[in-house]
Image (cartoon, rainbow, N blue to C red):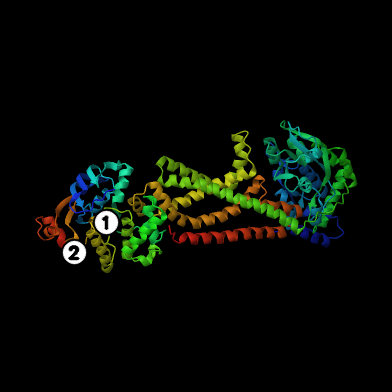
Amino acid sequence: MRSPNLYAFLVLAWMIAFAGQPAGAQETASGKPILFGSDIEGGGPYLFIGPDGKPLGFELDIVRALEKRMEIPVRHLQYDFASLVPGLLKGDFAMAMNGLEVTPERKEKVRFTRPYYIYRQQLAARAGEKRFEDLDSAMGISGLRFATMEATAAERFLRQKGVDLATYPSPTEAYAELALGRIDAVLLDLPMAVFYAKKNPQLRFCGPPVEPGEYAIAVAPSNPELLEKLNSALIGMIDSGELRQILEKWDLWDEVQVSLAGGGLHDHSQSQKWSVFTILQMLMGGALITIALTVCSFAFAILIGFPLALLRVYGPSPLRLLVIIHVEFFRGIPVYLLLLLVYFGLPELLPGLSLNPFVASVIGLGLNYSAYESEIYRSALQTVPAGQWEAALSLGMDRITAFRRIIAPQAMRVALPPMTGDLVALFKDTSIAGAISLVELNKQYQILAKSSLQFLEIGLMTALIYLVLSVPLGWLSRHLEKSMGKDENN
Amino acid sequence: MDLITSKGSRKAIELREVWCRRGQRSVIQGVNFSVAGGETVALIGPSGGGKSTLLRCLNGLTEFASGEISVCGRRLLPNGKTPFADLRYVRTSLGMIFQDYRLFPHKSVLANVMEGPISVQGKTHDEARALAEGLIRRVGLADFAGQSPGSLSGGQQQRVAIARALAMKPTGLLCDEITAALDPQLKSEVLGLLAQLREEGLTILMVTHEIGFARKSADRIVLLDGGKIIEDGPPEKVLNHSESERTREFLQQVIG
């Protein structure tokens, strides 16, 4: 795949060849559009799909204005918000613009234009919240659960404060969780708070917006000429009042935006240094959750799968049919969808039900694996010859004793190897629980990597932890398999 | 539990007008037949004649449709209606030995023999172990007690199966072609053991193709064909002086 960086490079080479001619005119002639990466899922008011199905947003308006001034066509590329910086560095698109906060960590990796908006963070709570009035008083309450969107400046801020924090891929989920009562307060950039929370009667703003920062357009360090063009176009927009018009149109203009004319806040805060010890400590915390989740989900899967297998093999035919439906349903849908259904869907069905992410994950993963487990037990039970039943019954055993002492142990030996495989698979599948804000090992990796932008080092550390846990799990189960294979002396 | 082991005592097994169906077919057609306590009876006849079905009806592994069966003084009821307590009494009184041994593969030889006394009769581990060790010695397999059944020869496995049945202290054995899968030498191991058990007064009803053994060791030979009893009498009479055309035909086929 040819990258936009390559386009930029070709354009640059071409410009050098025609040095002296006005650059803008040449580029229009080339007609090659550049891509801007942004996450439509992140929603309003940045860039979102309007009720008529057309894209809308104040950033789209800014892009259109920039396009005119730079005389370069700009096209949108849908990209996961939390991956915008790595995507830009990879060359998937030429510029990232998505309420991307200028943080010291990001500044180390990419180049930012001058800011086009000064954001502040707004705390929101449920309308009936009485325990706190603003961010400061909320921080003072122990046991309060905060939420924000992942990879935002608000996340960075709240993690520094060490509060109990859940992060979501979009603001809608964070506010939905707040309204459901699963969390107590959401801190997010003011534009999102205005767009999503202000009109929701279940929610209210707490205190004034705080912690200002800048939104700017990010470009790759290898692309200084684009940076320069964007900057001059932005200056033009600020000087002419066009930017103010756009912000006013979206109800985003306020007194702090005046500083845009001077180039923003001139904040020179340093990037946080992540020590290996801190990273390991946080990853270990995630690993503990992953282990607990694996154990509980597997226990739940066995608890459901085993009786299902009994019904399937020995039960009356209407029940057998129900078991088949259960197995096909939970085996046939993606476990990711199942988790979302359990976590977000169930509370719609049963208002007042407030499953925490761990319990929801255990239910989702457990139901999914119960389908596999019950199939394993079914086929294992069916491998025990009918003659074993007859031999046991002929000794005078009742059916339950015969099952318990003769049939089940033999089936167990057949079931153990595939169960082992499932346990290791489940161990890795727990990474999906991050989707509902459970901070297990993989989610912890995402948080750390996206905050520090050290994807490789932290990724390898995480992989190592997974391996250290899953490889002995394999050994242990193979050992079990062997010892189960040996004959009991009773 | 009083044992009925001496020859000529009251009937260990009694069938009256027993019918047994498999699907539309009547596999047993009005059989009347009995075995006295301590008697050894060989059940012979062509394949598909109903021998195994008859045997399985006697301990409730197969249901019968009508008629009367009583085993060791307990009535079995048609269509699987027998109360479990009676079924258990019958099954522990008459041990069943199968052609394919059916040992429990997940248990050692010793544990196979201990299983019934522990899980059915509620014996302690130590009691069961003492009993089982004695029986394993008795069938000549003391050196194999700790081994897995799969590592034994067919003849050895069948002797373990007999020891397992004997551990329940039965008054008799139902043997379903128990030497059919064995080589001639291994056959004699098992048949020798059976002859000993007969001497000790056990009631034995055996489905068999071993005419030689039946002649020597059975008190009676019963020939079953087409679900009906064709012949029932002492070996000498059935094998050498039968008046039935069908019997002579069958014997000619078997002995050759």
Query: Residue B223 is drawn in which quadrant?
Result: bottom left
Q: Nearer the viewer, residue A353 or A299?
A: A299
Residue on which disc 2 sits: B212
Q: Is residue A86 above or below residue A197?
A: below
Q: Count neighbours of disc 1 (C-alpha within 10 A) and say few if under 14, some if 14 to 19, many if 20 or more.
A: many
How many numbered dots are placed on residues in this image?
Answer: 2
Q: Are marks 1 and 2 in contact (CB under 8 Å)?
A: no
| Subunit under mark 1 | B
Residue on which disc 1 sits: B176
Q: Nearer the viewer, residue B40 or B26?
A: B40
Q: Is residue A146 left or right of residue B39?
A: right
**Identity of the residue drawn at 58% across and 44% down:** A363
Q: Is residue B30 left or right of residue A205?
A: left
Q: Amino acid at mark 1?
A: Asp
Point out residue B139 in the picture as x, y percentages from the top left corner: 31, 63
Q: Amino acid at mark 2?
A: Gly
**Identity of the residue drawn at 79% across and 37% down:** A250
Point out residue B21 in the picture as x, y percentages from the top left corner: 25, 45
Residue A61 got which mark?
A: none
Determine the CA span between mark 1 and mark 2. 17 Å
The quadrant of the picture occupied by the C terminus of chain A is bottom left
Q: Nearer the viewer, residue A331 or B6?
A: B6
Q: Nearer the viewer, residue A237 or B144?
A: B144
The quadrant of the picture occupied by the N terminus of chain A is bottom right
Residue B72 in view, yes or no: yes
| Subunit under mark 2 | B
User: Dot 2 lies on which element?
Assistant: helix
Q: Earlier in the sequence, mark 1 or mark 2?
A: 1
Residue B100 in view, yes or no: no
Point out residue A304 in the picture as x, y percentages from the top left corner: 51, 45
**Identity of the residue drawn at 73% across and 56% down:** A279
User: Dot 1 lies on which element?
Assistant: strand
